[in-house]
Amino acid sequence: MTCARRKLLSRSQRQATILQGAATAFVTKGFTGTVMEEVAAASGITKEIVYRHFDSKEALYRAVLDGAVQSLKAEFARARQRSQSGAGIRSLLAVGRAHPDALRLLLVHAAREPEFADYAHDVRGRVINRVFQRRKHDDPLFRRWAVEVAVSHVWDAVLTWLDMGDPARDEEFARRCIAGVNALWAAWNAPVEPPSGADRGRYGVPSPGGRGRTAAGPVSGLKHTAPGEPIEGGVVCRIAAEGSKGGETAMHNTQREEARVG
């Protein structure tokens, strides 16, 4: 009777296995709720082997985040080299297919962990600044708001597609997501009729010939922040620009205009 010889992994291969198992454990139970035995079990090894590669649970969590960031940078560069539109969306999708738990840890869970909230804030801030430099709006406040919501929208859209979408239709999703983002940005830049009559007071718009009300409405209640600083009440999830009368038109336009999100 012959026993199957166990295949030995290189150090880099072993670390990759540990990082994948750690990402699954951390997403499932959080940083505090996860113990190294669970990471080892998810990786198919012993706790002692985990500690040979990572000194602490915090170092392991940070390594998972670092790996996700480096993977995103590599995929983003590949998409740009191929001159593909929506490089940010495509890079998120590619990393999400290869490392779904690591991506979710970076985009969602890390911000909730006190030990890694600054890390997550820094990553989001860099994405926000990159989009802010490329996207325009006549109103500085709404420009800032639009960028924050655009980034949140795209992150959420990609994560939702990873949960429920068909991998065979990833390219279709990417095109639809880009088209939707472009249409949204175009709508946010479109002229808006000023409120009239009774609505003037609600939005703090002075009535003709009078002072009117100045009560804070949906717009005046927003806080203007500097690039890189999140707006109060922002959510954790992302967008681009092109006009259209419907999603179909925007989708056609996307094929000839690069989406600049993220």
Image: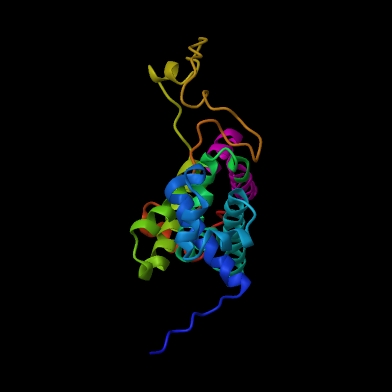
At 66% from the left edge and 35% from the top edge, which residue is drawn?
226
Residue 7 seen in this snapshot: yes
Q: Quadrant of the N terminus?
A: bottom left
The magenta stretch is 120-147
59 or 249: which is nearer to us?
A: 59
Left or right: residue 90 compared with residue 163: right
**Against 241, is 8 above or below?**
below
Q: Quadrant of residue 117?
A: top right
Q: Position of residue 135 (x, y in %)?
A: 59, 48
Q: Residue at x 42, y 18 (%)?
A: 202
Give the x, y percent position of residue 98. Answer: 48, 66
Q: Is residue 192 above or below residue 48?
A: above
Residue 193 magenta-drawn? no
Q: Relative to residue 258, is residue 156 depicted above or below? A: above
Q: Is residue 13 left or right of residue 248?
A: right
* Most frequent secondary structure within the magenta stretch: helix
